[in-house]
């Protein structure tokens, strides 16, 4: 039995994959304020470029009781994580906590607060947008990376068209974090992924941010596994050059289209709390732990927080942001 908590864009998409795969029974936790809207949805639905994936809506759970639950999938936002942990009953032996949250801080908090539970990272390599209760739209091809050798968990997620892979420990989570460092750049300049990977100033900023982060990871001996079939040095050379291959590769491999934006862009647009502290801020914390420095990533954290403090946001031009960061 699996239970999903957090049926937003990511959670609903994962629930649809699990229900469509049909290998594990699933329940979706519904807060009182969400229950009527969830109950009114006859099915789960994920739209994508090739059509849509539908599955019957699983039963709804009105409590977080974990009796008989083998996997608890947590797909809430970072600000809700501690409150969720506070309300969880004791985690039964044999129940695995599966974290889908970006970055590494959620894994640390779960392991600190639930020291006797098995916590597994699930790295979500897709971009999903919420459309309506239990309905989402995928703007990239879906890929999931499970940070353990749990074959049962991988099979439960393997819906048609979904690539599910295994990774050792947290290397995949660090690799995704590196890619997601670009989200702050896009948020500050209101840039799409296409603009990030084709405009010269934005690419130069991205290279500078990545170099800072990769240098700290290597200095600390932290393993990272980029979600691409070539090493960082090759990816960096492509970004730093004049070729359009980084964008063509992203379109081919991930199914990106020209108006795909990271979710942080929408968060800034609507004055919502962003994940910049869990992404770029993670590099800043790593630098502090090893006595290094991450001035560019620290600046991005500061600038994104300042940008989201007022509406409408006063976006940076790519050239101005590059000059500010010294990229």
Image (tube, rainbow, N blue to C red):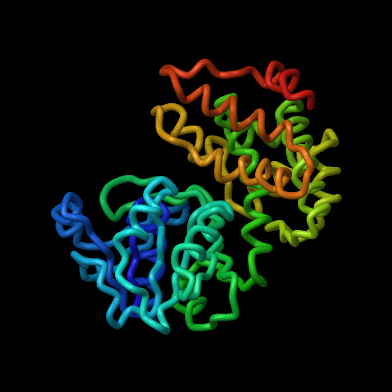
Residue at (17%, 56%) from the top-left corner? Answer: 35
Image quarter of residue 15: bottom left
Q: Residue at x 64, y 69 (%)?
A: 169
Q: Is residue 321 left or right of residue 48?
A: right
Q: Position of residue 97 (x, y in %)?
A: 44, 70
Count up the numbered dots: 0
Which residue sits at x=79%, y=55%?
Answer: 220
| Picture quadrant of residue 284 | top right
**Left or right of residue 294: residue 7:** left
Q: Eyeballing the image, is 209 above or below 111?
A: above
Occupied quadrant, residue 7: bottom left
- 34 lies above or below 293: below
Q: At which x and y percent is residue 33?
A: 17, 49
Residue at the (75%, 59%) spot, across then down:
222
**Does residue 317 lie above or below 290 as drawn?**
above
| Location of residue 120 in the rendering, given as x and y in whole percent from the top left corner | 53, 70
Query: Could you tell me which quadrant the C terminus lies in?
Result: top right
Q: Is residue 229 above or below residue 166?
A: above
Position in image of residue 285 (x %, y %): 66, 45
The N terminus: image quadrant:
bottom left
């Amino acid at each position: 039995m699996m239970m999903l908590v957090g049926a937003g864009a990511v959670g609903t998409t994962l629930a649809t994959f699990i229900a469509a795969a049909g290998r594990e029974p699933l329940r979706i936790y519904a807060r009182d304020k969400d229950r009527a809207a969830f109950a009114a949805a006859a099915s789960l639905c994920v739209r994508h470029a090739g059509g849509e994936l539908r599955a019957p809506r699983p039963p709804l759970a009105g409590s977080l009781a974990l009796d008989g639950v083998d996997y608890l999938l947590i797909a809430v936002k970072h600000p809700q994580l501690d409150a969720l942990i506070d309300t969880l009953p004791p985690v039964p032996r044999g129940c695995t906590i599966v974290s889908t949250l970006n970055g590494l801080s959620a894994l640390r908090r779960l392991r600190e607060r639930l020291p006797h539970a098995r916590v597994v990272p699930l790295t979500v390599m897709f971009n999903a947008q919420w459309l309506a209760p239990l309905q989402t739209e995928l703007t990239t091809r879906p890929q999931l990376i499970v940070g353990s050798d749990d074959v049962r968990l991988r099979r439960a997620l393997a819906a048609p068209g979904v690539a599910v892979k295994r990774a050792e420990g947290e290397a995949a989570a660090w690799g995704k974090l590196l890619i997601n460092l670009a989200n702050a750049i896009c948020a500050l300049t209101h840039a799409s992924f296409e603009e990030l990977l084709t405009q010269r100033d934005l690419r130069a900023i991205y290279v500078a941010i990545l170099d800072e982060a990769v240098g700290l990871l290597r200095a600390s001996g932290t393993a990272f596994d980029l979600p691409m079939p070539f090493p960082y040095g090759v990816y960096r050379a492509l970004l730093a050059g004049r070729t359009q291959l980084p964008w063509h590769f992203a379109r081919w491999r991930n199914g990106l289209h020209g108006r795909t934006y990271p979710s942080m862009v929408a968060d800034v647009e609507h004055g919502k709390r962003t994940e910049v502290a869990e992404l770029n801020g993670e590099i800043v914390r790593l630098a502090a732990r090893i006595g290094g420095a991450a001035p560019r990533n620290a600046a991005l954290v500061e600038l994104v927080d300042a940008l989201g403090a007022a509406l409408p946001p006063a976006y940076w031009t790519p050239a101005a942001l590059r000059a500010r960061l010294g990229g």
